[in-house]
Image: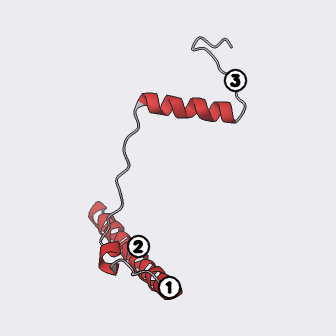
Amino acid sequence: MTPHELNLQIMAFNERQRAEMDERMTLFYLNAGWSRSTKPMPSLKKLLSKQPNKKRQQSPEEMLAIVKNLNAAFGGTRRCENGSS
């Protein structure tokens, strides 16, 4: 398989995944509408046209803060950079 053929396969796979997600979203939308008929439902077109949000890159300071919180939550010990406690 050439790189071009691989790229075509990947693009086709992604398109199938997107179509399946749209189909599931449509089913969930209709089910929600039938189960709660007291509120008006948002437009299905509006829901299906949403693109996934791009994730923001974390800064090194944010990553360090998260790691420190996880370390404390799991009962880890704090170590200095030179290896001593």
Residue 31: numbered disc = 1
Task: Give the residue at the far front of this rendering.
Answer: 38
Cα separation, mark 2 vs mark 1, equals 21 Å
Instruction: Report whether 52 appears left or right of 62.
Output: left
Q: How many marks?
A: 3
Report the residue at 32% width, 64% height from top: 51
Lower sequence index among marks 3 and 1: 1
* Label 3 residue SS: loop
In the rendered view, tell whether residue 74 sits above or below residue 12.
Answer: above
Residue 35 image offset from top left, x and y in percent: 53, 85
Residue topped by disc 3? 77
Badge 1 density bin: few <14, some 14–19, many ≥20, Cα 10 Å: few
Q: Quadrant of residue 14?
A: bottom left
Kind of residue at badge 2: Gln
Residue 8 image offset from top left, x and y in percent: 29, 69
Residue topped by disc 2? 17
